[in-house]
Image: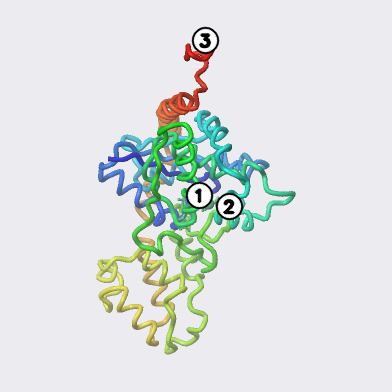
Amino acid sequence: MSVILTGDRPTGQLHIGHYVGSLRRRVELQNAGTADKIFVMIADAQAITDNAYNLEKVRTNILQVMLDYLACGLDPAKSVMFIQSQIPQLCELTFYYMNLVTVARLQRNPTVKSEIQQRAFHGGVPVGFFTYPISQAADITAFSADIVPVGADQLPVLEQTREIVRAFNSLYGETLVEPQALLPENEVCARLPGLDGGAKMSKSLGNCIYLADSADEIKTKVQSMFTDPTHLRVSDPGHTENNPVFIYLSAFCRDEHFKAFLPAYQNLDELKAHYEKGGLGDGVVKKFLNEILQHELQPIRERRQQWEKDLPAVRDILQKGSQTAYQEADKVLHKVRQAMRLNYFDDPSWCQ
Ligand code: ATP
Ligand code: MG
């Protein structure tokens, strides 16, 4: 039995990278019923670390992310969905954990490094952004989570949490739970590339197929995707590695999709072999990918449209979830204060 915690930054709507990297797994774990508790956090405070001058973006996207959660099948009866900033205990934990991490260690963190590069902050990197792995340690430990389903980009950040937990426990006594990352089994899903085939699909880079995209938007985006630049004529041999269309196919397609949409092939290996040999056009492969994405995303989009009609219900779920999360985090904060002996007024031995 275990406690699961995951989350997303409300910096935009969720995309198919989030879906295959983490969301799909969360819903499976939720429905398997094997976890003791599941917490899903909308990380608005973390989103502020690089959006302090654009709070409205964060505010509006909280509801967008929540709609995406409900659309994908996260269920408030089984998973606690909450908003990070409503849990002030997380700030206090962060404040204490800051003393267990050096500036040099954060500077070496590959996720922090690449995200700073990606963002090109004008006027310097905000301290809050630089230290976000520490607040992420607070998010995870506040719920005693032992499993954190994430994409590959978050591995160094999770390692930072594990180091903080070990440092805390060895200094102040066994208090915090050390978490494990849970990556998707399919390597391709752990870091889905963007439509441009370059960097990972990311809200901040605008290279996404969003879960809320209309059927037409999905089709247009698939048609505009990069493929193999050396595959100029249909008869040319093609490359499937580093070819985003084939990468998306390995993230989404199952053998039954061939029966339904491309019966000339049995499975992805056959399709790949034909492409690599030559004689298979990009148009056919893109059409197939489009059919699959339409099939997978249509029910998600329809559920989203249903929830969009009842935003007060969405708000209530978040409010109740935030209350539950507050109580859980408070229990852990209490333990942390005890372990650090900050409980001066409850401790008669303090001024004897
Ligand atoms: P931002 O650009 O604002 O950081 P993002 O698209 O990177 O947004 P996050 O909210 O930072 O999304 O990430 C939420 C979760 O989704 C994390 O577990 C992250 O590892 C995972 N994730 C994000 N992008 C991808 C991707 N392209 N492929 C697989 N997993 C991803
Ligand atoms: Mg991110």
**Residue receiving disc 3:** 352
First in sequence, mark 1 or 3: give its number.
Answer: 1
Question: Is the CB of mark 1 within 8 Å of ligand 1?
Answer: no
Q: Residues within 10 Å of mark 2 (few under 14, many from 20)?
A: many
Q: Residue at x 31, y 40 (%)?
A: 2
Q: Which mark is residue 157?
A: 1
Q: Residue at x 35, y 83 (%)?
A: 274
Q: Out of 203 and 169, give the one closest to the viewer.
A: 169
Question: Is the CB of mark 3 within 8 Å of ligand 1?
Answer: no
Residue 65 location, x and y as percent? 47, 44
Residue 277 location, x and y as percent? 37, 87
What is the secondary structure assignment of the residue under circle 2? helix
Q: Residues within 10 Å of mark 3 (few under 14, many from 20)?
A: few
Residue 53 location, x and y as percent? 68, 42
Q: Residue at x 39, y 77 (%)?
A: 284
Assign the N terminus to one quadrant of the image: top left
Q: Is residue 293 depicted above or below 144 in this figure?
A: below
Q: Amino acid at mark 1?
A: Val
Q: Out of 300 and 32, give the one closest to the viewer.
A: 32
Q: CB under 8 Å between callouts 2 and 3?
A: no
Q: Is residue 225 depicted above or below 17 in this figure?
A: below
Q: Is residue 52 left or right of residue 299?
A: right
What is the secondary structure assignment of the residue under circle 1? helix
**Residue receiving disc 2:** 112
Q: Is residue 122 left or right of residue 223?
A: right
Q: Is residue 316 visible?
A: no
Label 2 to label 3: alpha-carbon separation: 46 Å
First in sequence, mark 2 or 3: give its number.
Answer: 2
Q: Which mark is residue 30?
A: none
